[in-house]
Image: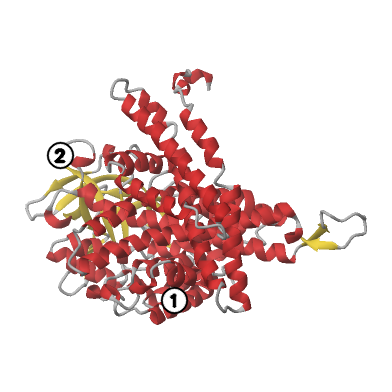
Amino acid sequence: MHHYTADLRDLQFDLFEFLDATRFGSGPFEQVDAETAAGVLTEVRRLAEGPVAASYVDADRNPPVFDPATHAVTMPASFAASYRAWREGEWFRLDLPEEHGGFGAPAVLRWAATEMLLGANPALVMYGTATTMSTVLQALGTADQRRLAELMVERGWGATMALTEPDAGSDVGAGRTSAAQQPDGSWHLSGVKRFITGAEHDLSDNIVHLVLARPEGAGPGTKGLSLFAVPKFHVDLASGVLGERNGVHVTGVEKKMGLKVSTTCELTFGATDVPAQGWLIGDVHDGIAQMFKIIEYARMVVGAKAVATLSAGYRVALGYAKERVQGADLTATTKDAPRVTITHHPDVRRSLMLQKAYTEGMRALYLYTASLRDQVTEAAAAGDGEGEAATLAARVNDLLLPVVKGFCSERASQLLTAETLQTLGGSGYLQDYPVEQYVRDSKIDTLYEGTTAIQGQDLFFRKVVRDGGVAMTWLAEQVAATGAPAGEQDRLAVERRRLSAALADLQGMLAALSGFHAEAVQDRTALYKVGLNTTRLLMATGDLVTGWLLVRQAEVALTALAGEVSAADRLFYEGKLAAARFFTTQVLPRLAADRAVVEDTDGSLMQVAEGSF
């Protein structure tokens, strides 16, 4: 046994009982029926728990080695073996549409399978993102670039998304990497990118960098950026044969607290006698919009990774708690009372149920978000891609993306430290168990692809204000419907009442923030009051949606329990009821305090002198 155990039962519940399972075997997903999808999950679980998970610990203890003289990285042999096992199974085709040699699977299935790989060995998925990046070239590129995309898939080449620069950080529009057009139509790039994941490794013989750069003469900010394809080695597109080394090199690999097997690189363009030659993607200067197609995928990866790691940690903690004998039951009256496993202690149960509820609720959140993307695909296949339903699904998907990325990463990182590791006590701090590595590997999720603060600002300013509140209003209506009383005999009456109260609290926060935003028309400093609360709004939105999805899952569980179920399934469904009750009564009431904080914000913090900090 390796470190990872997948929660296959809960993934099956989400795909085939909770979400709309009718999409399997119909419409654009006709070739992937429910039986095929279930088989995919079973096989990916075997791969994840076996050869993929096998190198997780070793690759952390023996990370990649960078040679600055040759700009080359040597990967750990154990990790290379895990990567080959994934590659040889051709599971990368899950992310490809059928017309490009893929399975043509629904997004919900792709992400459910990806969760298991992320939980087993997250860096493997990151090195494998070239498949998804190739679809961007297929959709937006020229004929030559579409051929390059084919080669990326066929040859298993790597790929990167190169945005961040040392001086710009998250302010992408401040990037200074430049591009000069050449007589042959290509471009020579000059500059340095930082924190580029997978920019150098020996898992494949080529890497294609997708680089944001500013063409000479272009304006400032993000609107002046264009997107270029810059391969590590030049390629003869007709034959696929590699040519000379291009002038793009890794000039440093970061030493990190976690996720060590994932190379995080400084990438330098045009610093040698050989120019860094690239090609404008699609022959159009639309870089930030093009890159966002990759960024949106990357943010889903981060959210799913966070949930996957929390799930892995929870299962380790649960197994430990069921076996660890310590102390007597709290109700014992004698000193010689029998010792019990720690699952008998109230606070341990509180901790375990908190981990379970968040794990299952946030899994439902990212899969529900993926199902919205499936709705868009289904509408397009039916010739209604621009219709009202498809447009609304796309808008709600956009609304939830910062929640999936920012909320899931924050909650998972917090819980892994405060609850999962704590369940194991001092043993959790040791490398005898994988939890300490989970803690180190998960913290990055709150930072890259846009920090939590950036996700909070994106949620309010772009996904609520710029959207005119359309997606948020629709989502609130769905929550309100679930929170409505369902009769005197409703077993979920308490949960619905708490959900409705939490919805009112979130709407109160939104009203206050909207008021501050309107106030800023006359006094720009009122925006500070918004900025002081956008992260709070993000987390509150995530908690509300998680609670809503848990109550909806409880409805499904009640229906199932009304029929004939196995003993194991009965325990599973009762666990769904317990998670919904715990979350709505123990977590959602906190939104009332958050609302009070938001409504009482006066902006005085922004007037405190720097020297007073």
Query: In front: 466, or 164?
Result: 466
Marks 2 and 1, the one that precedes in the sequence = 1
Query: In front: 505, or 157?
Result: 505
For the question of whether residue 332 can be seen, the reply is: yes
Q: Residue furthest front?
A: 488
Type of residue at label 2?
Ala
The answer to whether 524 is drawn above or below residue 76 in the figure is above
For the question of whether residue 169 can be seen, the reply is: no
Q: Which residue is mark 1?
A: 85
Query: Residue 372's quadrant in the figure?
Result: bottom left
Q: Which residue is mark 2?
A: 218
Q: CA distance from mark 2 to mark 1?
A: 45 Å
Position of the N terminus by quadrant: bottom right
- Residue density around tag 2, few if under 14, some if 14–19, many if 20 or more, within 10 Å: some
Task: Give the x, y percent position of residue 575.
Answer: 60, 64
Task: Give the x, y percent position of residue 16.
Answer: 44, 73
